[in-house]
Image (cartoon, helix red, strand yellow):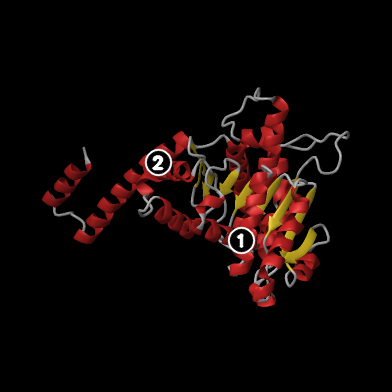
Amino acid sequence: MDYLSVLNSARNHKLAPPLAVLRRQQFLIRVLGVRGENIMQESKFEADADNILRAITPVFDPNRHKGQAGKVAVIGGCREYTGAPYFAAISALKIGADLSHVFCTKDAAPVIKSYSPELIVHPVLEESYSVGDRDKDHISRRVVAEVDKWMERFDCLVVGPGLGRDPFLLDCVSEIIKQARQASIPIIIDGDGLFLVTDNLGLVSGYPLAILTPNVNEYKRLVQKVLNCEVNDQDAHGQLLSLAKQIGGVTILRKGMSDLISDGEIVKSVSNYGSPRRCGGQGDILSGSVAVFLSWARQLILANEGNLIISPTNPTMLGCIAGSALLRKAASLAFEDRKRSTLTTDIIECLGRSLEDICPAC
């Protein structure tokens, strides 16, 4: 007997529930139906994250020297924001990168250095308040040159955590992005870096080694700018594919209940459970994590010269999938221990254990 038959029978026997109850029941049926369809759709796109993590995480080798497991640089950190670049840079180390640099303003440097002696901190960025109009060109060239002389040493740049929106600083960072492209250095754009590139898409357009990691609001702004429409959650996969393709084959990691990832060719999702605790800074962990895994994926693909049996084969996609999956697992472990008091630093401390659970070091 179907649902309507049951209702009619109940009415005939004067057992019909109140109208408000009926409406709630019908609403629940519709919601469950839609959710079921969404789950089926998600399963088609779900990435094999654990196997990807195992495939791209390097084994320990006594013959390797310092730096071969990854050298990451974060471009960010100003007077107001010192936590974000630290979170991104220290996360890279906690996962297994050998060296992690932070290029920040002079005001931010002592604070970031005080967080950890493990980070290499460069106080080279400048904000408008400390630069006279006549000195802007000279100082801009000096800032870009200071970063550029280190550029060839890095496997990946993370641009944006704690960057702020100072116009002079953003102009300098635009030039740094251009230098990174010329050197074929992968670039992950997060936080205020997304504010910068959304207004100047030419900085990343057509660069296949660029990754954008927008949250809900940043993604909305990108869609409006590039596709000239609103976010369409009913066709989230198709819209993301179109967006990545329209920007020129960059990889986009759309953060959300399920993280969606596309390079303009395919779409993958990472949906394993994370944490209901939404403390600030988790996006910074993600950007640092993706930087390390992207570096490892590139090394693996180059070493195997196209003979790698793994899908997808694009290193930016692999880096995003691995970084997303590991952060979610670490957030879940941290929440299990700390519940409502979970902080970003707690999640960072769970990164190593999370990776060890999936691919043990020994």
Instruction: Give above or below for 312 relative to 176.
Output: above
Circle 2: element type: helix
Give coordinates of residue 124: x percent, y percent.
75, 64
Q: Is residue 349 visible?
A: no
Earlier in the chain: of badge 1 and badge 2, it is 2
> In the rendered image, which residue does mark 2 sit on?
238
x and y percentages locating residue 334 in the rendered image: 65, 55
Residue lying at the far front of the rendered structure? 134
Residue appearing at x 14%, y 51% in the figure? 11
The image shows residue 303, relative to residue 126, as above or below, that is above
* Residue 53 point in image, percent of width and height: 65, 37
Which residue is labeled 1 in the image? 339
Q: Amino acid at mark 1?
A: Lys
Left or right relative to 99: residue 285: left
Disc nearest the viewer among 1 and 2: 2
Residue in the image at 64% along x and 75% along y: 133
Q: Is residue 231 left or right of residue 297?
A: left
Disc 1 and disc 2: Cα gap in Å? 36 Å
Kindly state the secondary structure of the residue where label 1 is placed: helix
Please state the total of marks drawn on the protein image: 2
> Which image quadrant for residue 170?
bottom right
The residue that appears at 57% across and 34% down in the rendered structure is 48
Residue 209: mark in rendering: none
Quarter of the image holding residue 176?
bottom right
